[in-house]
Amino acid sequence: MIGYAHEEESEHQQCPPDRVVFDEASGQYICISEDGTAYVIEQVLDQGPEWRAFDAEERARKSRTGGPISPESGSAGVSSMIDWRDRDASGRKLSPERRAEASRLRRWQIRAKVPDSLERNLQQARDILNVLAFKMGLIQVIKERALQIYREALEKGVTKGRAVEPLIAAAIYAACRIERLPRTLDEIASYTKASKKEIARCYRHLVKELKLKVPVADPRDYVHKIAATLGLGGKVVSKAIEIVTEAKKAGIVAGKDPAGLAAAAVYLAAQIYGEERTQKEVAAAAGVTEVTVRNRYKELIQHLKIRPPTS
DNA sequence: AAGACGAAAGTGGTTGA
DNA sequence: TCAACAACTTTCGTCTT
């Protein structure tokens, strides 16, 4: 788990400004350190609608005294150098504050020119990945996989013309699937500004272009997660997995939402062991509706001849 | 009162001409 | 590109505990 920094002053010192990211959804300024660890350095309490303008993109634009940085715009969109003289446009001498800012901007400008566009894109992607991973509580393996996927995509030019955030979200989704850690698209989308549709498009694109071998989602992977969020024990889990396996043999799985089937299996297994949960609870844990749980449940007891104790 | 059930209409994505 | 289609969701009324 990642700690919250309370000594904002010292934390600000340790965190170079170009490693600070504003996360609009949570209203937090997050510092990403070299090793990818994220710290919340400031919580913006009052998030009025006016904060919309203060998203990461806007910040980046303002910070760099240039146009927005796009992968296509060869040289970072810095169109004018900052004058070395400490005077403003009308020739007046600048206040100390303004002078400090000007020199800061000069420094950034020099720094921004050094890495090539690929590296810069990758760095931006890393930032977004770190923020998302931080919010979602992703483990290191997933982060590495996702970044690996993204880097490959970037190097093969597959990312051309697509926004970084949905691509990263898609890479995370793919990484989760590959590592068999169940995360629905909906879930990932809820952490980003990108729509589910957009992420799905990017995901399909990535899989196709990079020829990623993504295993078919297995309902059994979802069982653990659902059971865990409902606080159900190992007995229920293994029973649910047994049920899912049976369902596969019976051939009632094809084309169905694996999360829905897993939910129904957990629901049934919990009933069998007298640790009953409502359909509503199970459905929420699985990210499907009660109706789907009901339908799968009905199919299960119909085809598998497993019955809950009618008590 | 809360949960379970099921019907009916709506939604977004896939498929095949 | 469009229409048909399957799976899932939303909504809502009814039954059960």
Image (cartoon, coloured by chain):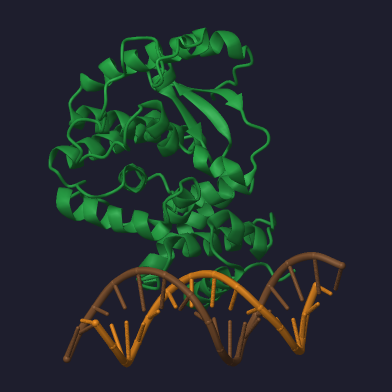
Chain colours: A green, B brown, C orange
Position of the C terminus of chain A by quadrant:
bottom right
Where does the image place residue A150, in percent across and percent down from the top left? 25, 39
Q: Residue at x 46, y 57 (%)?
A: A242
Q: Quadrant of residue A32?
A: top left
Residue A270, above or below A91: below
Residue A32 vs residue A227, the one in the foreground? A32
> Viewed as shown, does residue A104 lie left or right of A233?
left
**Drawn side of residue A204 relative to residue A173, left or right:** left
Residue A29 point in image, percent of width and height:
53, 27
Q: Position of residue B15 (x, y in %)?
A: 24, 78
Pick whichever, A180 or A91, lies toward us: A91
Residue A208 vertical placement versus A23 (above, below): below
| Quarter of the view holding residue A93 | top left
Q: Residue at x 24, y 34 (%)?
A: A148
Q: At 51% from the left edge and 37% from the top edge, which residue is drawn?
A: A54
Front-most of residues A212 and A107: A107
**Residue A136 visible in image:** yes
- Nearest the viewer among A284 and B10 is B10
Q: Residue at x 57, y 67 (%)?
A: A289
Number of numbered discs present? 0
